[in-house]
Image (cartoon, rainbow, N blue to C red):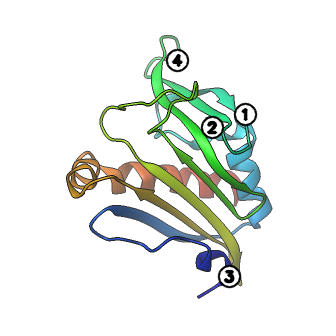
Amino acid sequence: MTAHLARTRHFDSALDLTIQRVIRAPKEAIWSAWTDPEKLAKWWIPEPLTLRVEALELRPGGAFSTMMSEDGESFVPHVDAVFLVIEDFSRLVFTNAVNSSWHPAFPDPVSMTTEIIVGDHAEGTDYQAIVRHGSPEQRARHEELGFFDGWGTVTEQLAKSVE
């Protein structure tokens, strides 16, 4: 097990979903794509939707808020979350169980805690997104709603933006 994965909590297949792939770019490029609002807006929603980053406060407790649009003009909430962990160039963790104003949240369709892990790989960067849910029902709901298609698409868009 690599050092960056050793810091990860146990993966529970009854509660968690994950996407993992090697991206042929340095981890610094992937980190920048996650932490630069302009870059994040270009890939972190499936095309042809448009994303607007409202808040990206890269510190524990910092706000993470995005809006999405089908027409590029009228925007609706996409993510309203807080960061829990920021480890430069290796890991970031955020949850939507608490909103960006630090109020308890009951997000629709599911609450989740997301852990993004980037690590060195001989061919570029080992990229993993682990999405943790509070119950097997929430995990199943997220999978039924298209977790693998949605997260797979944005991971592919991320790769294209940095490779």
Q: Are marks 3 and 1 in contact (CB under 8 Å)?
A: no
| Circle nearer the N terminus (2, 3) | 3
Q: Which mark is residue 72?
A: 4
Mark 3 or mark 1, which is nearer to you? 3
**Mark 1: secondary structure:** helix
Could you classify mark 2 by the number of other residues whose Cα lies within 10 Å: few (under 14), some (14-19), or many (20 or more)?
some
What whole-number distance in Å separates the C-alpha atoms at marks 3 and 1?
30 Å
Circle 1/circle 2 CB separation < 8 Å: yes
When asked about the image quadrant of residue 118, the answer is: bottom right
Q: Which of 127/104 is in front?
A: 104
Q: For the point 61% across and 58% down, which residue is it?
A: 159
Cα distance in 3D space between marks 2 and 4: 13 Å
Q: CA distance from mark 4 to mark 3?
A: 41 Å
Residue at the (55%, 50%) spot, across then down? 157
Query: Which label's residue is closer to the chain start, 2 or 4?
Result: 2
Q: Quadrant of residue 57?
A: top right
Residue 42: give its label: 2
Amino acid at the residue labelled 1: Glu
Q: Is residue 147 positioned above or below 24 on the image?
A: above
